[in-house]
Amino acid sequence: MKKRNKLKILNDPIYGFITIPNEFIFDLIEHKYFQRLRRITQMGLSHMVYPGAHHTRFHHAIGCMHLMQQAVRVLKFKGIKISKEEELAVLSAILLHDIGHGPFSHAMEHSIVHGVSHEDISLRFMEALNDEFSGKLSLAIQIFKGEYPRKFLHQLISGQLDMDRLDYLKRDSFYTGVAEGNVNSERLITMLSVVDDELVVEEKGIYSVEKFLLSRRLMYWQVYLHKTSLVAENVLIRTLQRANYLVANGHKLPASTVLSFFLEQKINQDSFTKEVLNLFSKLDDYDLVSAIKEWISYDDKVLSTLSRMLINRDLLKIEIGLEPYTSEKVDLHLDNFREQEGLDKEEAAYFVFSGSISNQAYDSKKQHIKLLLKNGETSDILTESDQYNLEALSKKVTKYFICYPKLGFKC
């Protein structure tokens, strides 16, 4: 019997040809858990603002693996000893780092399951795959969890300047057409080095780091926290909340078998068993879109209206400001809409609400971006940069929003 060729080359619109490095990585990519990422959009509902933003978590994970290949190659060229086992582990870990995302990515993180982050679900998937592949992911899991003594390997996966951020900024910039996010990932990776088992950037790469941090700030305000995306995400969350409420009160909503399970069962850390993980692996964007289309016709005014708003992109009005909106202003919109539509206060609250968003391009308290100076010493990017606005990027900026129906809106 002819042996299957597993050394494939993929054509990526961002980086060109990407080589799958070995048969084990190929087997991970081919696994049904990983293939599900083809059906999970990378940017949630951002396509409602940027029509091209339909790329998936699958694209992103493959791109991250490619950048990790480049990073390992650069570090080994500079004399950093990385064993074959460590290289395979770090490639596996970055490939699987987002495997736990649910439908529409971050939008569904607390609506499908409760109190279980996508990072935690990713770890559960990795542990299940580790059992299936006879322990070949043990080192990858150790690095992913930050328990491996060589810190720089974890920093390449999850840090201030990791392969995840380098790919999603460049990829999301490409698919949205927002040029401000187009970072020079190749230049940044070429400037990487390791000192005392921690990731550093050579001093001559300082301007590329500054551009990276500025790009990250601009992409958050202009894309990830865009007001229309924000409204759409909140409407989607409230649609699921209403569905959960109705199911808990005896309603039988039209939905796929797997989505029905998560609507009927309140899954948390304690109840997230291997059986639940297997069901979660079958849940994707298609389940949600199909259900929401059906819910438009369902005999519940709140659910049908929320569903129609999403499908037809007829969303709420949003105001964003630097100060929290007063409860009096929220109540005014709430009472007006409640009286107009004959809803009770709890029902009207699905359409009138307030909240906050924040943006911090560089969190120096969590982890530093260190520069390797010409004299061999290391220093924080904030200390060495001559850009006054770089220090401003390290401060968390919080903005506040209020959402309410547009003038003339009818349920």
Image (cartoon, rainbow, N blue to C red):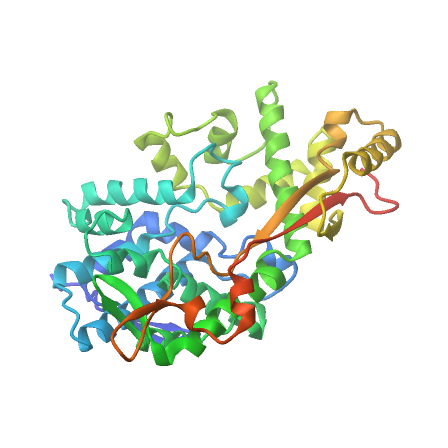
> Residue at horizontal 51%, vertical 37%?
110
Relative side of 101 to 44, left or right: left
Q: Quadrant of residue 193?
A: bottom left
Q: Position of residue 380 (x, y in %)?
A: 38, 66
In-front residue for pair 392/96:
392
Q: Position of residue 289 (x, y in %)?
A: 58, 45
> Residue at horizontal 19%, vertical 67%?
5
Is residue 96 visible from the viewing direction of this image?
Answer: yes
Q: Position of residue 246 (x, y in %)?
A: 62, 24
Relative vertical location of residue 225 with respect to residue 382 in this rendering, above or below: above
In-front residue for pair 158/289:
158
Q: Quadrant of residue 178?
A: bottom right
Relative vertical location of residue 71 with respect to residue 159 in this rendering, above or below: below
Q: Position of residue 357 (x, y in %)?
A: 61, 49
Relative vertical location of residue 286 with respect to residue 49 in this rendering, above or below: above
Q: Quadrant of the C terminus?
A: top right
> Residue at horizontal 42%, vertical 56%?
38
Relative side of 184 to 317, left or right: left
Is residue 26 visible from the viewing direction of this image?
Answer: no
Q: Quadrant of residue 218?
A: bottom right
Relative vertical location of residue 333 with respect to residue 373 in this rendering, above or below: above
In-front residue for pair 295/202:
202
Q: Quadrant of the N terminus?
A: bottom left
